[in-house]
Amino acid sequence: MTKRVAIIGTGPSSWSVFEALSTQDNACSITIIDAGKRFSPETAKNFDSGQKGKFGSNHMYDTDGSLLSFSGQSNFSMAHGGFSTVWGAGIRLWPEESISCSGVDSSLVYDEAKKLLIKMHYSGDRATLNFPENYSIEGKANPPGSYLASKITRESSRDRLKIFPTALAVNTEGVNGCRGCGQCLSGCPYNSIFDSGIEFDHAINQQKCDYITGIVETINESDYSVGIRYVTTSGEIETNNFDEVYLCAGAVGTPAILMRSGYLQPQIEVADSQVFYFIGLKPPNMNKQKQFALSQATLISDEVATNEFSASLYLSNKEVRERISNLIASKLFGLRIPIPILVDRFLFLGIGFLDSENSGKIVLRLAETENKIYVSSKPNPNSKILIRRALKSISRRLRRNALFVFSGISVIPDPGEGFHSGASLTLGGEFVDETGILRNSERIHVSDVSILPFIKPGAHTFTSMAINAAVIQRVTK
């Protein structure tokens, strides 16, 4: 009898779970359940700091009908494809020591990561992707217009802060290859940036899976199945039963569903990697033919540093200038000062992250009388001190590359606004066992960033994808 499997969500972790299940010998029928919000011109607006749009739409930040109430900017998406519709696309894997802390054999994680790379386009090589030396990974060129990557100098073994070109889920080859148009932050017209929603559309069109558009309220396990209760696009409430369910609703969405379903206590804390923004000056770029607006270079601190951090460097562009203008307006009573295009020749932007141990938390609290979850942030008072130290280290290191950082100028948003969160339902921890199944369940799997042991500074999505795929392979072997 064919096993009925549901995957809740369409983000990158959902896609990696779908790919892993699709390769299993045991036949299963897979249904994707997702809120499915797509492009909406009616919601176009000015975006908050750290937010990216897609052709003027901000549907990926729409939380209407989610049964969640956010005190600030949300780290939650109901979009088809989740935040991969607008993500930074960084895919550098965590160090092997950190991967091993997940409770999954690192070699299995690397094997699954390599399989994923075969199915998704990327730029980078073995070193920038952070694979061990015994793995053969084909090197792919940096996207055209990666000016900062070309400015990187050779590393010294004594450097405590490493810098290298950023490995990205960006296609640089063929008809869908990056053309250097510079529109990365407002919607790639060539589909060069990996979007799991597009990958799911291909799978649905090829009839590799079924698809239900609906907002999941609760999941409840019986003796023989799991019932998923969801709200349809017409507002009706329906329930479908499955043999197994894989929860891939994201750092906030997954624990929220389990809280409403009664599997978790009424308050949960989600780990976060505190984000901070900084600016600097660079030598003028004379080549105006190509532009690339995503991360071009990555810096990471020594892995044994007490103040662990990571930072990505971006060139200034139209979207960056608009956000600087919006920031000035918020500080000067709405006075909007246009930033001249000339600054693009000299200005660059940095986005940094701290590790979750030195960052704040996202707090989820269930109000049972309303059946609503309130989401708020809990800052870490030590984060600002550590960010100042990190900026001083970044400033010293970048001087070697003739890049000058204003180390005394930074913007520090609330926890969760950097979209690098998770680790609330750690694999092998209090709520989830070593196989990824909820401890008080037999059929409910947690399969996204929620199972990570902590949040390292920098990219964490690709590591989550590989770990979740590895868990499935380990269990079914």
Image: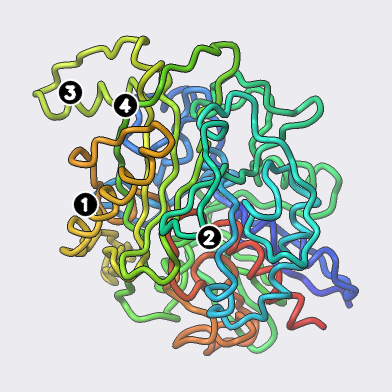
Mark 1 or mark 3: which comes first in sequence? Answer: 3
Which one is nearer the viewer's eye here, 420 or 46? 420
| SS assignment at label 1 | helix
Label ID, residue 246: none
Mark closer to the chain start, 4 or 3? 4
The answer for how far apart the CA atoms under marks 4 and 2 are is 29 Å
Q: Earlier in the sequence, mark 2 or mark 3?
A: 2
- The image quarter in which residue 291 lies: top right
Residue 217 image point, x, y percent:
48, 63
Q: How far, Cα to Cα, is label 1 from label 2?
A: 34 Å
Q: Name the residue under label 3.
A: 329
Q: How many angstroms separate mark 4 from mark 3 (CA)?
A: 10 Å
Measured as percent of width and height from the top left, residue 99 is found at 57, 73
Q: What element carries label 2?
A: loop
Rendered view: 298 above or below 240? above
Q: Disc 3 on helix, strand or loop?
A: helix
Amino acid identity at mark 2: Ala
**Which mark, by number, is residue 388?**
1
Q: Name the residue under label 4.
A: 323
Q: Where is residue 13 in the image (x, y as percent from the top left)?
A: 62, 59
Disc tally is 4
Tell me the kind of residue under disc 3: Ala
